[in-house]
Image: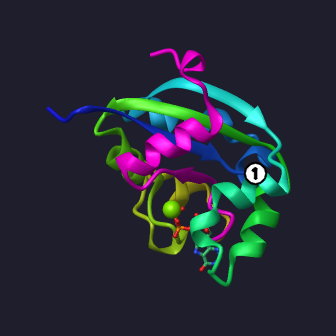
């Protein structure tokens, strides 16, 4: 049995625009990831830039921020056994062309940038990213 973890998920603007929130949430729940917090937001440029600060030297940074503020997002906390790694598995590879069949990105992503979901990449980053969007009282497990 893996440890019970929490991870941060974001349903990105390409997915909210196509009303895929329910279908994506079904993938999480079918995999055993419990949605223990969720809210729909329109990120500001400052928030998106700060959230993706680790990528600020990457060539795609400006485009990524513009994309993330192009429409509403749904930020969520997912809870379950090995939630960080399990969510990455359910999401699929960054580039949908490389994503496994049945994954969210394989089924729904439009491109390597507009790839429908964000998920924390480590337990340490999950803690930081959850705290970026949620207070403890907003997370109900
Ligand atoms: P991840 O979301 O799978 O963890 P990261 O490498 O952390 O992938 O990149 C963050 C986000 O930046 C990606 O989800 C995608 O939206 C965007 N991105 C990553 N690589 C590229 C690229 O080569 N071109 C355009 N956008 C990219
Ligand atoms: Mg990442």
Q: How is the image coloured?
A: rainbow
Res 133 → quadrant:
top right
Q: Residue at x 50, y 50 (%)?
A: 119
Of residues 110 and 1, the one nearer the viewer is 1
Where the N terminus falls, by quadrant? top left
Q: Within 10 angstroms of label 1, few (less than 14), some, or many (20 or more) residues?
A: some
Q: Find residue 69 and report its horizontal and vertical position in percent.
A: 82, 55
Q: Find residue 7 and report its horizontal and vertical position in percent.
A: 45, 40
Q: Find residue 16 and report its horizontal and vertical position in percent.
A: 75, 44
Along the horizontal axis of the image, is 79 left or right of 57?
Answer: left
Task: Name the residue at the left extreme.
Answer: 1
Asked if the magenta segment contains residue 89, the reply would be no
Asked if the magenta segment contains residue 129, the reply would be yes
Along the horizontal axis of the image, is 83 left or right of 25?
Answer: left
Rendered view: 123 above or below 141? below
Along the horizontal axis of the image, is 97 left or right of 43?
Answer: left
State the SS at label 1: helix
Res 32 → quadrant:
top left
Q: Which residues are magenta?
A: 112-141
Rendered view: 99 above or below 18? below
Where the C terminus falls, by quadrant? top left
Q: Tell me which image quadrant ligand 1 sits in.
A: bottom right
Q: Residue at x 75, y 33 (%)?
A: 40
Along the horizontal axis of the image, is 12 left or right of 102?
Answer: right
Of residues 107 and 54, the one nearer the viewer is 54
Of residues 57 and 141, the one nearer the viewer is 57
User: Which residue is tagged 1?
Assistant: 47
């Amino acid at each position: 049995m893996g440890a019970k973890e929490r991870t941060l998920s974001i349903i990105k603007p390409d997915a909210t625009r196509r009303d895929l929130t329910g279908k994506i949430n079904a993938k999480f729940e079918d995999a055993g990831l419990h949605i223990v917090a969720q809210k729909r937001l329109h990120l500001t440029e400052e928030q998106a830039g700060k959230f993706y600060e680790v990528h600020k030297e990457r060539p795609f940074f400006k485009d990524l921020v513009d994309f993330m503020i192009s429409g509403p997002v749904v930020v969520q906390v997912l809870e379950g056994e090995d939630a960080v790694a399990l969510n990455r598995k359910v999401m699929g590879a960054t580039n949908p062309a490389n994503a496994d069949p049945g994954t969210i990105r394989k089924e729904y992503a439009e491109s390597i940038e507009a790839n429908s979901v964000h998920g924390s990449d480590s337990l340490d980053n999950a803690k930081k990213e959850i705290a970026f969007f949620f207070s403890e009282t907003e997370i109900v497990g």
